[in-house]
Amino acid sequence: MKNLRSLAFFSILTLGLLSSCFEDREVLFLGAQVEFEQAVTNAKAAGQSFPLLTALTRASGTPSYQVNLVGAQLSAAEAITVTRDEVPASLLNANTIVAEEGVHYTLNGNLDFPASASKVNFTGLTILPGFPAQTGKTALIILKLDGNSNLKPSENYRRLGIRINLN
């Protein structure tokens, strides 16, 4: 019994000594990045690095997409842009085409991120109501956040796939 207590004491002492030898390393992210909220909260499309959102219609007008700031607050307002990215060929088929600017949508990609904000809404995409109807087809556009020298986009959450119902 005495040996069992000694063994238990020695085991606890050894575990305490071994665990105290590890150096704690704290990793801090000191920069600032921007990301689309919908890219964070929606599942990515199969084989892609971005989600495909629910299809918009010709009556959608100007949808709003939230852009989040990740990291430290900005000390001054920053101008970033949202551009169109190339649609992967694997997403195109007989019923899905590439959306054409000026036919299906217009894009004003300028976005000002205020210094005091942690999120802002991007409203620079407008769906044009007068595009030609093509029953059963959708058009696809990929939006991409572009940063600047002070504010980088989060690589994992910088793209959104947006479908436009062509009915």
Image (spheres, helix red, strand yellow):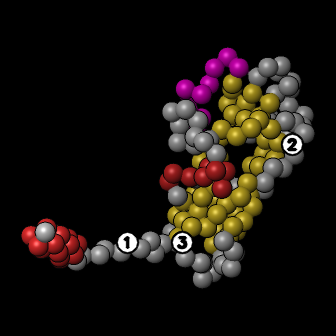
In this view, the mark in front (1 or 2): 1
Total numbered badges shown on the rendered structure: 3
The boundaries of the magenta stretch are: 83-95
Foreground mark, 2 or 3, reads 3
Q: Which residue reaches farthest front?
A: 1
Please, what secondary structure does the residue beneath circle 3 have? strand
Q: Which image quarter is the N terminus in?
A: bottom left
> Which tag, 2 or 3, sits closer to the chain's start?
2
Crowding near the residue tagged with mark 2, few <14, some 14–19, many ≥20 C-alpha atoms within 10 Å: few
> Which residue, as the protein is rendered here, is positioned at the far top?
94
Which circle's residue, 3 or 1, is located before the other in the chain? 1
Residue pictured at 62% horizontal, 25% vertical: 92
The residue that mark 1 highlights is 27
Distance of mark 2 from mark 3, alpha carbons? Answer: 32 Å
Q: Assess disc 3: are there few (<14), some (14-19) or many (≥20) residues with their C-alpha within 10 Å of its C-alpha.
A: some
In magenta segment, residue 19: no
Whole-angstrom CA distance, mark 1 to mark 2, is 43 Å
- Is residue 64 or residue 21 the one in the foreground? 21
Which residue matches tag 2?
A: 60
Name the spot of residue 154 as percent of width and height, x first: 52, 58
Task: Give the structural element (helix, strand or loop) at label 2.
Answer: loop
Decide which of tag 1 and tag 2 comes sooner along the chain: 1
Q: Is residue 70 visible?
A: yes
Residue linked to disc 3: 71
Q: In which quarter of the image is residue 95?
A: top right
Q: What residue type is labelled 1?
A: Val
- Amino acid type of the residue that numbered disc 2 sits on in the rendered structure: Ser
Tag of residue 70: none
